[in-house]
Structures are given as structure tokens and as C-alpha cells.
Image (cartoon, helix red, strand yellow):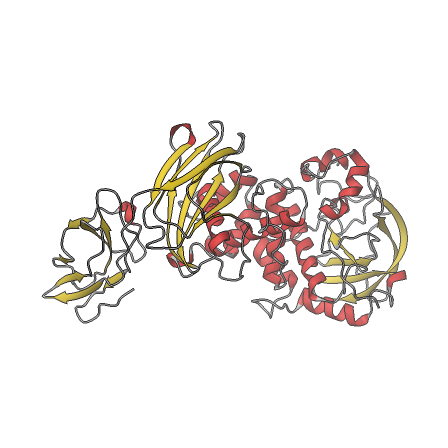
Amino acid sequence: MDRSRPCARRAAWLTAGALLSIVQVANGLTPSRCLTRQIDSVFPRESPLHRTAPAEGRRGPPPNPQVGQEWLWYVWDLGGYPEASLLPCTVRGLGEHCYVVVENSQWGVTVDQQDVDAILDRFNESSPGATPNLGIYDINTQAFGEPPDALDNDPRIYLFYYDFGISADGFFWIFDQYPDGSQSFESNECEVIYMNSGAADPGGDYLLAVAAHEFQHMIHFAQDANEDPWVDEGMAELAMHLFGHPDAISGFPSNPDNNLTSWNGSWADYIKVYLWSLYAFEHHGGLDFTWAVLHEPANGIPGYNAVLADLGYAETFADVFLRWTVANFIDDTSFADGLYGYSTTDLPPFSHTLHVDFPVGPIARFVNHWAADYVVFRDGTALSFSFDGADNDAFMLEATSRNTGTTLAVAAYPPGPGQTASFGLPDFGVGYEDAVIVISSVAATGSGTYQYQAQASAPGIPPITDLVPAAVNGDVVLTWSPRPRAAEYAVYASAQPFFATDGVTPWTVTTTSYTHVGAVQAGSSWFYVVRGQNAFAESIDSNRVGAATTAADLPAR
């Protein structure tokens, strides 16, 4: 049998990029348009979902079908406008949660018994990912919820394999959730995931991951049928990750200026929403998060805001989005307790504009809504950076300082009136070698245009790298070496190990030591950073140290 694998594409509700030409034939739509929002006008649904009883002589499978049983089923010709033909299909496998049905002409050609056995195992019993003792059905229902079961009253899912004849992997056809004859398109009147037996190895983990993707669409349709496409597709991509065979991360990293909330079915769109969903999953509740997203009535950004609030997070969608844009570039789990990285995948480098000659600009640019541009300064000295964005938009700037791939600091610089911002990078070239500026649009409207420039400024102060704590008679004594150009030192202390200095009032000293009186007490812990400063500049944070609850235990952090 032919096991070749073409370009990986899939179709959900017959809306993905692989089937774009079909919808274009149907209604003249263009690739730049969001197809899911137009699906009702292209393929109108004429009766309420799940509320019409099956008609007499229903088209669905016979009750309780068994292996070897055959019937005529609607099979979709996807070479143009969707057309259904009645073709003989046979049950080739039966498991706890699924039937494997194959169009008769494909048996022994693109699908064989070895494939069926692998499909049954992966859907019902096992997976190659983090939960090897769970199959697709259990992984998806635990993460997302229950699938529909309105017409056939059979909890098993039909996995139907036939040769699509086009470059697509699978789809979930919403009209199967209506009685045949009640809509503009035919219905097989049961829960079916259509899989392309001619696209890849039907029993291989790639196409089975696509089955997990399509099964999420089915569940999402049952729980929130009018969800925004970027949310639904993101959860479907996450289903592939949970199964253990996610899509390769490509396309989006080379063009990150891609509106997260816009969907056109391109490969980059799949990866964009995959990374967003994975980041939110890892940092905001895991399975509780995915379950809440599917069961939240609000859609898109309002839905995410509601989910975050319901799960007890103070952050908004915009807050998570901004951290996500930084995480996409640095992917550093060793910094800030992993807040700016991914723990279950590694990212390739993201496209950026690199400057090694100074001064820079002014340079005019454009960024899409809910997207990011990355500007990197390297091999320079202290800089002053200025930004001016379109007044009709809303921007956010985040500056990251890095040394040979290690993140030292991330700071946010929200523009003020007129969408302008200016800030210094005094330690650039002294305390760190790379300055990464992440420029994001955090609005749904506006022109997205902006300009930036950078020029030399007063030299910075090297960071303190040898901060040491010691216990002396119940006090914590901090000492460090003097730093060039530092007129004084700001000592920051907090009971939180990874505290942000922006929220702490420091003690200021002109010497290279400080005594925190009475700090060593039972039941308390203190953590410290020190910065050198003068009238023009301030160093980045020193090495972070901690004083534990006893004088005998003062570990450096």
C-alpha cells in the first residue's frame, strides 16, 4: 500500500485551508477571509441543533453494527462543491469507544487489518505522549468534555476512512448532527470523523493525531457550537499535543506578525494557535483550563477573560498574550520560574530585525493586531530607545536583556499619551549582549503603524554578580563588590523568591554592604537583589540570594 505523506493539512467542519477551494467554489470566498464565521451562509443550517427527532427511514448506520456489517453511506466528493454519493462501507473494527468503517473500494488498498488494529488501540487504549495508558477518547473527553450523541443514541464514535482525492487529512461534518433531509446537505445521522485513507498511513500516529484533532472539533461543536475559529483550532491542535504527536513548529516562527485572533486556515495559523493554546495550558491550569474554555459560553477574547477569572487568575487575556509573545522568542524556562518558556516543547528561532550598527532609525514598521514584532540590538553600548505608534492603536513594549541565550530581565514599557515611549538601555554592551524589544499591538482596531529609533546614551553600570548573605546575631548582612560608575546601591528585599523590584521600595546605601536588622527569625524567609545606580543609569538586578528561617541556612539563589 502507498504510505506516502503529502503536505499535512486537515479540515474541521469542512472549513480548513485544505478545503478552501471548495468553499471558494461555493461562495467566492478568498483565502484571507475567516471561513468559520461564514459557514452558516455557505452551508445554511435550517433547524435547531439536536432538537429535531430522526425521520422515519433514517440514513444512519443500523443499530448496534458489528464487524463485517455493510451498508450504503453518504461519501463526500471533495474535488469541487461537496457532492455526496451512496457507497458501500463496512465495519472493519469495533472497540469500546469507536467503530472503524472503511469505504469498500479502499479495503486492502489504502487500509488493511493492521491499520484497523492500530486505530482501535490508539483510539481506545494507548497514546505515544505523556499519558501512554489512555487512548484518544479518554484524553479528549477528560480535557474537553463529552461528544454529542443526539441522533443515534450510540456513544461510540465512527472513524470513517475513504480516499478524499484531495490534499486534506480529515474533517468533522456538522450536518451529520441533523436528520437527513432536514438541511441543505445530506447527513449520516451519527457522530462521524472522516479520515483520508489516501493522505498518510491510516494506522500511523500522524493521522491518528489528526483524528484526535477532529474529535476535539466534534466535542467543541457539542459544547460551544459558535466558538471563534482560532480558539477551536487551537484546542484541536492541543489535542494532537496531548495525544503525543503534535504538528511540527514551523511557518509561524518565520512570520510571527500574525494576528492571533484571525483565522484563514494557513499552516502558520495552525502553529500560531497551537503555541497559544499550549502556553495557556501549561501556565494556567492544564486540563482545568481546557475544560473551562470549551464550557465557557463567551467566545474569543471575552471567553478567555472569563475563564481566567473563573479559575482565579488575576491576569487578563492581554496579560497572558504579552507574556506569550516574549516566551515565543526567548523560550527560557530557567528565568522567572519558567513564566517565559514552554516546558513540554522546544521552539525554533523566531524571525526578528537585527541591529548591530548604531544609531538606528527612525525606522517605520507595521504590526498586526494581537501580534508581535521582534527587534534585537547586539554588539553595542548603552542606548536610548524611543517609540512612536499610531494614535488610533494600542501598543505594548517589552524589553528583554540576554547573555548567550540566558535571560537576565524582562521589563514592560507601556506607551503613554500619543502611543509614545522612551526608555534607556544603559547596561547594553556592559551587563548584557542582546537587547530584545518586543513590539505588540494589543487592540482589535487601528492602523498598526509605528516607528522606532535608538541612539547612544550614557554608559551603564555593570551588574553585581557576587552578592553574599551572612547571618550575624539575628541580622542578615549583605556584602558585594563595588561596581564602576555606581554612586550608590539600591537594596531590594521581599518574602517572595521571584519578586519584581518595581513593587518594592529599596534601601539606598553608598557602601558595599547592608545589614537587614532582625531578618533571621523562625518562620520567615527573605530574598534580596541589589542594583548599582547613579544620576543617569541603574544596573540590572544582581544575583538573587535568599536568607532562610535559620542563621545556619542561607542558600544563594
Q: Is residue 469 left or right of residue 309?
A: left
Instruction: Tell me: residue 372, above or below residue 407.
Output: above
Q: Position of residue 22 (x, y in %)?
A: 80, 42
Q: Quadrant of residue 82?
A: top right
Q: Position of residue 168 (x, y in %)?
A: 76, 53
Q: Quadrant of residue 194?
A: bottom right
Q: Position of residue 162 (x, y in %)?
A: 83, 57
Q: Quadrant of residue 26?
A: top right
Q: Quadrant of the N terminus?
A: bottom right
Q: How many marks?
A: 0
Q: Is residue 26 left or right of residue 372?
A: right
Q: Is residue 32 at least partly visible in the picture? A: yes
Instruction: Tell me: residue 368, above or below residue 323.
Output: above
Q: Quadrant of the C terminus?
A: bottom left
Q: Position of residue 459 (x, y in %)?
A: 29, 47
> Which sits in the foreground, 549 or 367?
367
> Which sits in the foreground, 205 or 59?
205
Instruction: Tell me: residue 390, above or below residue 54.
Output: above
Q: Is residue 46 at least partly visible in the picture? A: no
At x 29%, y 44%, the residue is 458
> Which sits in the foreground, 182 or 56?
182
Q: Is residue 122 left or right of residue 379?
A: right
